[in-house]
Amino acid sequence: MKVLVKCQFYLMTLLVAVLLTVGMAASDDRTNLSTEDVTQMTKKPTIMILGSPHLANPGADVYNTKMDDVRVPKRQREIEQLVTQLKAFRPTKIAIEADERFDAKINADYHGYLEGTYELKRGESNQIGFQLAKQMGHPKVYCVDYWPERWPILEKIDDHLTDRYAFAEAHNQEHFLRPPPVTEGKIVKDKDGTTWIEPAKYQSIIEMYIQRNEPQGRRADHQAYLRSARIGLGAQYPGANWIAHVWYARNLKIFVNLTRITESTDDRILLIIGAGHVFLVQQFLEDSGDYIVESPLQYLKMEDAN
């Protein structure tokens, strides 16, 4: 009987040992597989958002900074320096602030530029986007803005409940409107009512871009939009309507359009866009968990910059 018990104990011990060995081997296999998976999963595409002044400012904003002609030789040298510094990011794609419906026209212009038949216009999409794309050997640029010819959702809301400027003026709420950007300069108005900021001193292109990409300035921009959301009275929300249905919707769709042009974890996408968009687009990219977001400041403040 004792012999039988000993045999049973021995067999049970042997079985446990075998199971542990198999389990450890399986565990090692899972560990190796998991490490490979984690490595693959943690590799993400990279996006850098370059907040830009409007180099050919059309006066479409509440406050518009006066901009001299960047096609003059001095400005062209400054833009050449900026493009050289941005090349260090090694972008695989360059996205610009233009609606997708203009893609064919814009890329026809870009190919004309490559062939020497198109003269660059003043805007940052041409001056920076086209020049950098050419130097990087890119076959095209990508239009990722959302600015349709009509906003169907706004047609369902009464005009006076989306025009926050008119409502603010009529109800003594102009203090909620977006203040001027943080800059030194004189504020003037055209005959048509367009408000301009005339810079107090000359800024190089690099200096402009550094200023417009500092985090505190981007947060201040975002806070100004939220402040304008407060325009309204009672059940009337013209400020919130515009912020929700136009501003947030537009920037969220810009984020979605960026995801649509992302093809690989090796992608390094440079987005050139008005500085006011930076805060929200960056927030959407970071909160998605799908991208690495790089700051342009490390390239704008390169030690060898002039």
Image: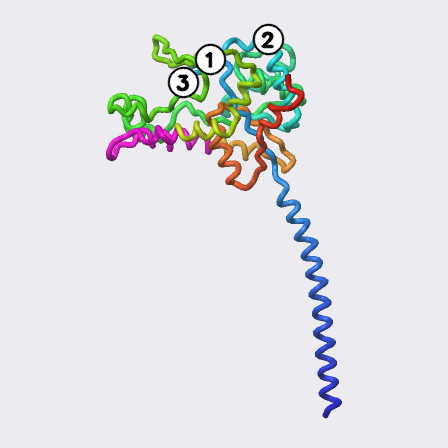
Tally of numbered tags? 3
CA distance for labels 3 and 1: 12 Å
**Which residue appears at 70% of the width and 79% of the height?**
12
* Crowdedness near tag 3: few (<14), some (14–19) or many (≥20) residues, C-alpha within 10 Å: some
Residue 261 on the magenta span? no
Report the amino acid beneath label 2.
Lys
Choose between 227 and 270: the one closer to the eye.
Answer: 227
Which residue, given by chain and number where applicable, does mark 3 sit on? 63
Residue 229 on the magenta span? yes
Q: Where is residue 80 in the image (x, y as percent from the top left)?
A: 63, 15
Q: Where residue 199 is drawn, which disc sits there? A: 1
* Extent of the magenta region: 225-253
Q: Which of marks 2 and 3 is nearer the N terminus?
A: 3
Choose between 184 and 113: the one closer to the eye.
Answer: 184
CA distance for labels 2 and 3: 26 Å
297 vs 33: above or below: above
Instruction: Label the magenta part by its dominant secondary structure.
Output: helix
Q: Position of residue 233 (x, y in %)?
A: 25, 31
Q: Which of marks 3 and 1 is in front?
A: 1
Which residue, given by chain and number where applicable, does mark 2 sit on? 74
Report the amino acid beneath label 3.
Tyr
